[in-house]
Image: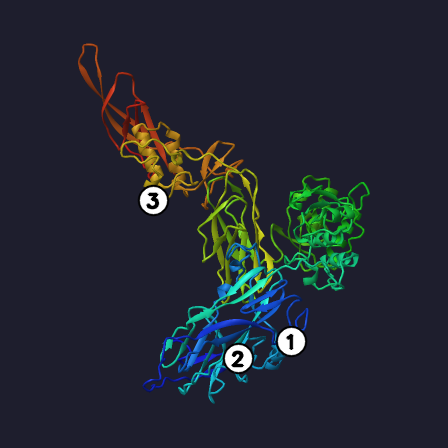
Amino acid sequence: MKRPFHARAGRHRVIALSMVCTVAGSALASTPTAQIRLIPVVTHPGGPYDTGGYYTSSNISGRRLTVGRGGGRTYWNVQIIGWGPKNALQSWVGTIDQSTLLGITADCGGGPGSCPEVGDLLLSAQPCSNNTACVNAFGEAGAVCAGSTCDAGFVNKNRGDWTHALISNGQGGFDEDVDGPYFWANSPTGELVLDWGFNRYGGTLVIDVPPNARGLYTIRWAPDTYFVDGATYSFAATLPGELEIVCLCDPDANNDGSVNSLDENAVVDCIRGDCSGCAATDCDADCDGDVDFVDLGVTRCEILGGSDCCNAPMGACVGWYWAPGYEACVETYQPTCDQGGGVYQGDDTACKDVACLCNGDVDDSGAVDTTDLNRVRSCAQYSVCTSCTNGCDVNCDGFVDYEDLAAAYCELQARSDCCNEPVGACTIPTGGWPECIETSQAVCQFYGGTYGGDDSPCDCVATRLFADANYCPGLAKLVRVVLDSFTAGTTVAIADTIPPGWTVAAISNGGSYDAVNHKVKWGPYFSSYPAEVTYEVTPDASTSPGCFSGTLSLDGVNNKVCTDECLSYQCCPFAAAETPGTVCGSCSVGSCAFCSSGSCQDGSVSLCEVISYGCAWVRGCNDDINGVTRAGFIWRNGECYCMDEAAQNFFPAACGAGHTCCIGSAAGMEVQTAAGSESALLHVTRPDLRGKTRQWELSVDLAPPAGTAAYAAEVNLPAGWTVTAVGEDGGYDEQHRKIKWGRISETRRRR
């Protein structure tokens, strides 16, 4: 029988259990009426806002806890209720369905999964050094320190309403296994506890709520939930707990009872990293999990007497003097933009859509010089940004970093396209630099550093890789996300955002596609994680760059997925053997289903396509001798191909999902079709002048260079001549009046 009826080794405990025979009448006396439920409680130390432990205006109604925002800790009691008359309780197990803690299950009014991207509820990871620290943190006896963190669940067996409190040797606890976190209790010697007639306590679950949690989470019991009374039974009902997070939209950041300029100042300071004037959760007026200029807009809206300020229109604001050296563009409320002297770009505009001036003259002196470099460096390195009159964010990406130093240095050298300067990891040994910075090779050398190469990251826990940097509408593209070997961390989740309008398929490692937010998601993984996850994405008809963005969350800390981000539109012609054509007799040209090894127009030439196209060439459905040899050449040398634009010809290339490419040259690869070696014996007839038929025999000898991969030959037949036989695997194309031979797999000379 499953837990708890076996010996199990928990953390720092071993429990030996045994089955005993029950006397007649000790099994369940009637249909089960017992229920198990999860209810919110406030029996713990005060929380961040009031003595009840939850935020102001939070409330508990039955099994639902409603709080005014994310961030904070919640407590839940396991309760067994509705016990029937004359029924006994020997043991029970209640398992939490951990999948119901995920943000993808949250309901924002349209059913589970209807919320925008929101956070996952987390089993508490309260640090500890001993059990006393956990008891003090959770406010109740029974809390256990397991290693360096408190167990997220515990059982206070000192409570008189605990399910086995009346049993002298009753045992119980909280643990986790592959099925998830669970509570349990039992009487090892088989003592039966008679009906008590009132509700009983089973344990306490501690759940932390991230700041970006929103909507209604329904925390359910897993199927592995049951009780024992001489035999195993399912509870009559397993009632879930409900956690509802609503946004109070409270711009009173300093909690002084009014919204004024002090709140604006506190939010600005918090945006810049100093949240001493207001807790970060207080400064997050719109409850989206981030303190940003939108929160400042909400605050300004409230000051001006606006209504529904958390839903007030926001847009891009360029040149705002309240953010010197930080952002060239911010997204905020129009009156906030006007107040700061910025230029409002319109409601619902985004900074990423605003053109970047890419101005390295950060001190507005009229020229880019070493003074500008020093000021950008000071802003990036020491956060001294007030001297940047034009802002130190030279490349307008929303951050002041060493990429801006690369752009400014590029302008100093009078080069072009400086905001797209390639950057990589750079180690500079002296001068107070960080251990590694990401900048251009020229800047790295200027400061005496060691450059790691373009696109090399300083620290990257996940890397996105494409086979090449191009895409073509309708062709699937393989996306790989390679994970680093983490030295620490127990919980990993990955989300990768795809370009709008593109579609997803073939997601690896149990991942799924969130169509609402256009994200491919994996995890969370709690014990082990894959070294790589993949999916295929198919572009729509757009010709704009297709850009990706991704996040890897490691124990609740978000890390950007590095390197390859954008794909450029590029569609090449397809090789002739890949173009569907008229089906010719027993040839299957045009029938992609015939080719089990692939499909038409996928950037690779399979053996099936070579044979089908060659068959059609011999029989006259096409008359493309170069296409036949080119297809054979590609097939013999790797199957996938690229287009050499200079030579207007195809050459073999490494394969990848949807691989097609166009380049200026074939990097020295031989792309010319070589002649082949073949001999054939022909029998032809033509009428002579006396009206008699005469038979002619013609021999053709072809001599190719050594190493030729594929070749073909054809002979034009004079008008009025007919063919009776063709030797050496050749064929007669009656439509084009040609005798044809081809070889794609051998090069020996024949006669």
| Residue 192 position within the rendered picture, expressed as x and y whole percent measured from the top left | 41, 86
Q: Residue placed farthest to the left in the image?
A: 692
Quarter of the image where one finds residue 583:
top left
The residue mark sitting in front, 2 or 3, is 2
Figure check: 140 above or below 452 = below
Q: Secondary structure at mark 1?
A: loop
Where, quadrant-wise, is the N terminus in this rendering?
A: bottom left
Frontmost residue, 422 versus 296: 296
How many other residues sit within 10 Å of disc 3, few (<14), some (14-19) or many (≥20)? few
Q: Which element is circle 2 on?
A: loop
User: Picture coordinates of residue 597 (x, y %)?
Assistant: 36, 45
Which disc number belongs to residue 712?
none
Residue 155 circle label:
2
Q: Residue at x 54, y 81 (%)?
A: 156
**Residue 690 x/y as whole percent:** 18, 10
Q: Which disc, if any, is residue 45?
A: 1
Q: Which kind of residue does numbered mark 2 sit on?
A: Val
651 relative to 440 in the view: left or right: left
Q: CA distance from mark 2 to mark 3?
A: 60 Å
In this rendering, position of residue 450 left or right of residue 627: right
Q: Secondary structure at mark 3?
A: loop
Q: Amino acid at mark 3?
A: Ser
Q: Residue furthest right?
A: 365
In-front residue for pair 190/443: 190
Mark 1 and mark 2: Cα distance apart in space? 17 Å
* Image mark for residue 596: 3
In this rendered view, identify the residue nearer to me: 715 or 416. 416
Q: Is residue 363 above or below residue 584?
A: below
